[in-house]
Amino acid sequence: MRIADGARSDVGRGRPENEDSFLVDPEHHLYAVADGMGGHRAGEVASATAIETLMAAYLGGQRVDEAVEAANAAVFAKAAENAAMRGMGTTLTAIAVQDGKAVVGHVGDSRAYLMRDGTVTQVTDDHSLVEQLVREGRLSPEEAQNHPQRAIITRALGIDADVDVDTFRVDLRPGDRLLICSDGLTNMLSDDTIAQTLRRHADPQQAADTLVDMANQAGGDDNITVILLDALSDGGERAAMTAAEPEAEPSLENSGAAPLDEDTEARPGGRGFRSLVLWGLPILAVVGIAIGAVGWYARRTYYVGLSGDRVTLFKGVPGGLLGWEPTVDHETDLTAADLTEAARADLESGHRFASRSDANDFLERLQEAHEALGGSTTTTTTAVPGEPPPLGETPASTEPTR
Ligand code: MN
């Protein structure tokens, strides 16, 4: 099986910098999109670090999910070492194609889609608050499409020392087409529009270019990155060549035989970085201290608010701060209905705390007050499928800025 690819990354119309990074490595059949966050410099560092580490780990013989874990560790370590990058994070959606199978490793809200026989389906699940509410039946997909809290993600690389990596496997057939993209595409274009465009353009590069152009025409609010992979059957001659050259497609087990070292760039046509496209590396050295300080502040504070109707502890600042979006620390069993009116009003704008333990003390007092009023825990799971909570009950939020 041969893979034809097309790719494009664009800053879009709403952002000064491109914080997305991507990888197209046709030699090793490794492809990935990373969407960085954490201030306009640290976001680029996070996504570029994730892509670099993913590639090195995969070529070093690790499985895709292990390589994504390695990328997490690298971003987390870099954030911990450098005050200016504290709190940075990134999504990562990676696909390795081998022996006719596409293995997907995924964290965050970038996406992979599969088009087969003209039908387009989303392979990955978004790790975002809004998509979680949809899966739980608390929001409809229509409400999710333009939800003000779309940008809050519940899982990312670089936030914790460990990360849960989703993996998916697609047994490819000739004619299949895979799309990997950042949310700058999917927040601008509906799934239907994306599907139509994928059907209309047979050439993968032309399809990638068209998708990016259309996302820009729709507003281009965010950075847009698109990778297209077409699974093609080998022609007779081509098949014979492949059979004679088993090394043409490195396997997960043996691809790491040669370590990544200085020799890699020297070898013509070898395991070089020629196909590695990174954004933002030149600015690694000029990360602003002020931006780091804001990020440090935004990431180390907590607030208690409502996600849907559920009382939730968030890490960050309500509504985000200069691109530092809050993330969910954990949801409690309490719902808005369990609160007094005053407490509800307090949480709707987000009650802030300097530390996690202060916030947890507050949550304990809320729980005690609820129990003292005769509330029982059986009243806490009142979400009725098909009757999602009104959007107005979610915490105040500014426009998504990630
Ligand atoms: Mn994005």
Image (spheres, grey):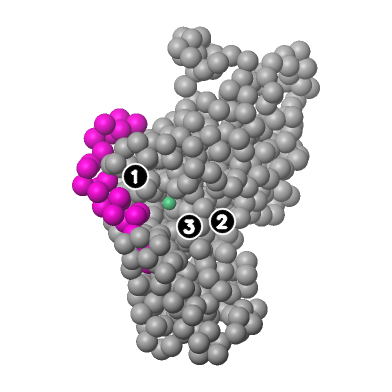
Q: Which quarter of the image is occupied by the N terminus?
A: top right
Residue in view at x 58 percent, y 24 percent: 59
Q: What's the residue type where badge 1 is placed?
A: Arg
Check disc 1 and report the residue beneath it.
Answer: 86
Tag nearer the camera, 3 or 2 = 3
For label 3, the SS is loop
Labels 3 and 2: the sequence-earlier one:
2
**Residue density around tag 3, few if under 14, some if 14–19, many if 20 or more, within 10 Å:** many
Where residue 250 sits: x, y (%)? 67, 21
Image disc number at residue 126: 2
How many numbered marks have been drawn onto this rendered protein structure? 3
Q: CA distance from mark 3 to mark 2?
A: 8 Å
Residue 149 colored in magenta in the image: no
Q: Is residue 165 above or below residue 134?
A: above
Please give the residue where the numbered disc 3 appears in the rendered image: 153
Of tags 3 and 1, the one toward the viewer is: 1
Query: Which mark is first along the chain, 1 or 3?
Result: 1
- Report the magenta residues as a range: 281-303
Q: Nearer the viewer, residue 303 or 188?
A: 303
Give the Cα distance between marks 3 and 1: 17 Å
Q: CA distance from mark 2 to mark 1?
A: 24 Å
Of residues 341 and 11, the one nearer the viewer is 341
The spot of residue 115 in percent (x, y) is: 67, 49
Residue type at numbered disc 3: Ile
Q: Is residue 284 magenta?
A: yes
Quarter holding the C terminus? bottom left
